[in-house]
Amino acid sequence: MKKIGSALFSAVAMVVALVGCDGLSSEPTYSGLSIEAFNYTPYNLSRFVITDKYGNQASGGGDLMPGSGAGRLSCCYQLQGTEFSVEWKMYDADVASKDLYKPIQYISFKEDIHLPPTKLEGNAGTRILGLHFYPDAHVEPEFRSDLGASRISYRTVHRTLLEQYGKKIDPAGKLNEAELFRRTARIASEAWKKYRLTDSEDLVQFVRFYLLVNPGFDRFPQVQEILKDTKGKSGDFGREMKNLPEAAVDQIKTFSVSGKEQQP
């Protein structure tokens, strides 16, 4: 009887050794995981690494331009638990393009994130952890099963501005296409930081008024009222601004943040 008990204990110990923490831990383990990044910053996302508290890592990036990342996966990883750290590097492409022989000046970031236990279906390629990188340097994680669902499309904003306002957005013709796009992304990212605007038409009108009317337009009392009334209502800010009477637009042109009217 003693030998049987000893043998049984040895067998259980062997199972525990084989199964390890994954089998007995209450924390979730995600295997066959693909990683997808969404870059909403005005800078290029060079590389990111997500690490769990056990040292497992998943990485991606690859020089993602502002507004890009949807549809680009890195695979296949295993992560465990609910607490993770994300480290990433970015750089300003406008600065880097001025001297192609100078080493790129990277900016490094790190943030701790929490992921509640989640049941994932499917297999590699459909078990996706999306990381949304925002302009204020915070990251929002999201489990998903498809490649899309970018929350901010700077490319759509830029394309719409070109279609609707053409050369007006760069009348002197000083900027090339890439520089124009990055300028749009910078202004649109400020609209998110200040007012959490994500809808493309909202962002089109924000960038339009910033570039073509007055950089301080959002401090104009009537615009402040519009921002307040449309908060959390996707697309409403853009429609209200697009439908502003010309008389109001003319007032905004001469408006000064200091409270004095600017000379035309």
Image (tube, rainbow, N blue to C red):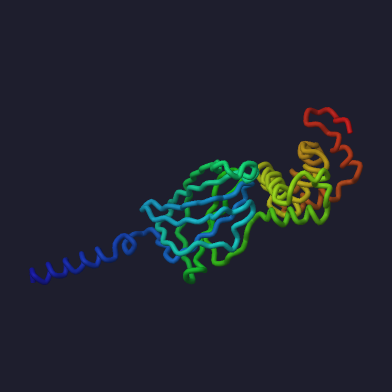
User: Nearest the camera: 50 or 192?
Assistant: 50
Residue 70 location, quadrant:
bottom right
Q: Position of residue 36 (x, y in %)?
A: 54, 59
Q: Image point 62% across, 61% down: which residue? A: 149
Q: Nearer the viewer, residue 194 or 210?
A: 210
Nearer-the-camera pick, 191 or 117: 191
Q: Residue furthest left?
A: 2
> From what the image shows, is residue 22 above or below residue 165?
below
Q: Quadrant of residue 201?
A: bottom right
Rendering coords of residue 226 (x, y %) = 78, 44
> From what the image shows, is residue 264 above or below residue 3?
above
- For the C terminus, give its image quadrant: top right
Q: Position of residue 246 (x, y in %)?
A: 91, 44
Front residue of 168/227: it is: 168
Residue found 83% across the figure and 45% down from its top: 171
Q: Residue 155: percent from the left, percent from the top? A: 70, 55
Q: Residue at x 78, y 52 (%)?
A: 161
Image quarter of the N terminus? bottom left
Looking at the image, which residue sits at the far right? 247
The image shows a total of numbered marks equal to 0
